Amino acid sequence: MDSSPTAAARRAAAIAATMRRIGYLTRRGVFRGWLTEPGPDAELHKLALLECLGVYDHSLAIKVGVHFFLWGGAVKFLGTKRHHDKWLLDTENYVIKGCFAMTELGHGSNVRGIETVATYDSKTGEFVINTPCESAQKYWIGGAANHATHTIVFAQLHINGRNEGVHAFIAQIRDQDENVLPNIHIADCGHKIGLNGVDNGRIWFNNIRVPRENLLNLVADVLPDGKYVSMIDNPDQRFAAFLSPLTLGRVNIAVNAVYISKVGLAIAVRYALSRRAFSITPEGPEMLLLDYPSHQRRLLPLLAKVCMMSSASNFMKNVYVKRTPEISKAIHVYSSALKATLTWQNMTTLQECREACGGQGLKTENRLGIFKAEFDVQSTFEGDNNVLLQQVSKALYAEFLTTQRKKKPFKGLGLEHLNGPCPVIPHSLTSDILRSSKFQMDLFCLRERDLLKQFAEEVARYLAQGESRERALMLSYQIAEDLARAFTERTILQIFLEDEMNAPAGSLKDVLGLLRSMYVMVCIDESASFLRYGYLSRDNVATVRKEVMILCSELRPHALAIVDSFGIPDAFLSPLAFDWIEANALSSGSE
């Protein structure tokens, strides 16, 4: 690790730049209404602004997101009027600088297992918050190392010797002059591979006291005499309610992953339309990179995927901002599935774009390498992607058991296709069949249906052998991950198809059809599940592979128009997307 004074100075400068930018945006009133203005339109406006910040500076977006969506979201959605009146306006105005202390050194995804303890003292009407061991230190807390004045502390609530489970508390950790308060110790997490404009910190609490009123009490409360009361009797449902602020975080991460993929592809495609290499005829001109079939195969399937995933991310945003208690489970499933899939795809896209730009992709000013380092964290924060996929499969399994037990049809999550007859896939596949939206949906639905059945049967076999339900689910992880991917890819296809059907007839609709078919063909080509479980024959898979090449040639003329349609401002791209020769000329002064 580079611990030199120069590296430390660069990191300090990056953190200071993030704070300057937040100060500028605050003074301009950009955040006005972010926590106090109600309604779906206000929420969509806020999400759009955060997307813009993420494309400009990921550290800025993360710091803003932690403050408004995690700290502010917890106060707003887990607190009640007493918390709203006291904290929300000061949060909007950045008088309070909030952070979100859930993750610990010893516990990340397993939030139930966190070790920080909050013990209620009925004599004083206070909670005593303590870090009982080193593994209980709060870790990776964005904003904590330098600036946060307050935090949401997630801790095990103890009352009269009884553990009531994980609850959320407001605690002040610094005064307004940013001096750390007594009985609190804060340390920096250190230099990271990316996001060094965010001051991630570690926090230890040494029996600090916070008022009883600082418990975020929408879900559960402690009365002055120490009586524990809750509107939700089921401990599992109560715990799920406490994790609700993470849902919006996952939505934001997934949406931003799509937009960064768009930026990377806009750079790589533009470069491939101006950079030439080799000639295929004697004395002939060198060919554009994007005229090589191999280069088309590298970039154009990624272009199709990002367009499909863009529809899915927009769908997820709209579902979230119009959420009701009845669809909270569905939102959790969608956000978990899409956060995992879209962030993994973002890293795949950025790596391919970096390589497709050759040595120029290594230059910092061309952004691709920076994006890789900055967005790598997306696969593990706000939920490890592998864990999220297993949560998706568990939710689908629960839906399966419910329909079996109640003898009712599937409803929601797009699972209604399971109520009908099993789709039949033709033995011989032609180009027309492969591009048929009916065939594509039938194939994806067949895979999802069969994997859900296989998953349920495998879990049942383990249960019959005497394994616990949790262990049976854990041992079935391979089919679980295949099922989650099948659900996600079918969901993305279904959402895009609806958007495509609503598009007016003409050239736009034709291009959307090409993008959809490319997405489906590439999903088949890249996934072993279609061959492994027998949904397609070896000959059919080979036919699909050839169809990808044909689709590449048909999408090639539309590549520039597609990346231009992303609407990315020129300032957010890089010299590589424009006149890269002039940018590197001696007269430009570039180094």
Image (cartoon, grey):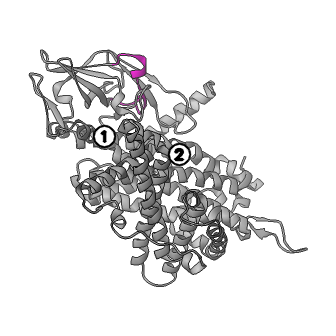
- Circles 2 and 1 in contact, beta carbons < 8 Å: no
Q: Residue at x 50, y 46 (%)?
A: 478
Q: Nearer the viewer, mark 2 or mark 1?
A: 1
Q: Residue 275, how many percent across, how many down?
A: 73, 64
Label drawn at residue 124 = none
* Amino acid type, residue under disc 1 in the picture: Leu
Span colored in magenta: 131-149
Q: Residue at x 46, y 32 (%)?
A: 199
Residue 451 vs residue 53, the one in the foreground: 451
* Amino acid type, residue under disc 2 in the picture: Phe
Q: Is residue 23 visible?
A: no
Number of numbered callouts drawn: 2
In the rendered view, tell whether residue 147 sits above or below residue 29: above
Measure the alpha-carbon separation of dots 2 and 1: 23 Å
Disc 2 is placed on an element classified as helix
Q: Residue at x 81, y 69 (%)?
A: 286
Label drawn at residue 375 = 2
Residue 287 appears in which quarter of the rendering? bottom right
In the rendered view, tell whether residue 191 sits above or below residue 473: above
In the rendered view, tell whether residue 574 sits above or below residue 297: above
Residue 335 vs residue 402, the one in the foreground: 402
In the image, farthest residue toward the bottom = 506
- Assess disc 1: are there few (<14), some (14-19) or many (≥20) residues with their C-alpha within 10 Å of its C-alpha: some
Q: Within the magenta stretch, is there residue 468?
A: no
In the rendered view, tell whether residue 324 sits above or below residue 445: above
Q: Within the magenta stretch, is there residue 146?
A: yes
